[in-house]
Image (spheres, rainbow, N blue to C red):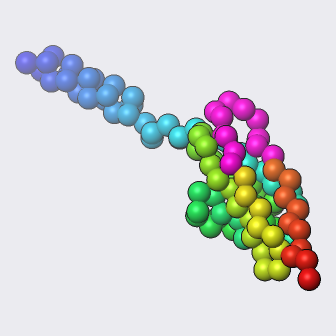
Amino acid sequence: MIGGARLGAWVLLAALIGCGPPAAAPTVSMRMVGGPPNASVTVDDVFVGTLELVVQRGVALPPGTHRVSVEAPGHIPWDKIVEAKEGQGPLRLDVKLVPVPD
């Protein structure tokens, strides 16, 4: 019976080794350039930071369709529907908000 216990221990050890941390979900890097730096960036109606921060760090998007919006006081809002495809390079967006005319 000792052999069976030893075999059970090996099976348990093998199972634990195979149960490492879960694989990270795939993402696509979204990179932005533009201004003004204090503009608010939202993805799918969730605030992700100022444009200045997003320009510096980027945003990791899950694959799929997303709505990206950029707004700043005194400027016309900017909206775009983007498709983040797994395996593609970084998604690059050029955002230059236009001041509201007087």
Q: Quadrant of the N terminus?
A: top left
Q: Please state the total of marks drawn on the protein image.
A: 0
Mark yes or no: residue 53 visible.
no
**Looking at the image, which is closer to me, 3 or 20?**
20
Q: Report whether 60 appears left or right of 72.
A: left
Q: Which percent across, then down, holds residue 46?
A: 58, 64
List x then y, in percent, for residue 102. 92, 83
Q: Is residue 63 above or below residue 101?
A: above
Who is closer to the viewer here, 95 or 77? Answer: 77
Residue at point 84%, 58% (across, down): 95
In magenta, the rendered stretch is 81-92
17 relative position to 102: left or right: left
Q: Residue furthest right?
A: 102
**Up/down of 9 relative to 27, above or below:** above
For the point 50% across and 37% down, the residue is 23
Q: Quadrant of residue 71?
A: bottom right
Q: Is residue 80 left or right of residue 9?
A: right
Determine if residue 8 is in view: yes
Q: Position of residue 48 (x, y in %)?
A: 65, 64
Please state the horizontal and vertical placement of residue 27, each as a whole percent of the image: 62, 42
Q: Quadrant of the rendered structure where residue 18 is? A: top left
Comparing 83 with 59, the one in front is 83
**Residue at point 66%, 63% (across, down):** 42
Q: Is residue 44 magenta?
A: no
In this view, the residue farthest toward the left is 1
Give 36 or 20, whichever is nearer the viewer. Answer: 36
Residue occupying the point 89% across, 74% down: 99
* Residue at the limit of the structure toward the bottom, as seen here: 102
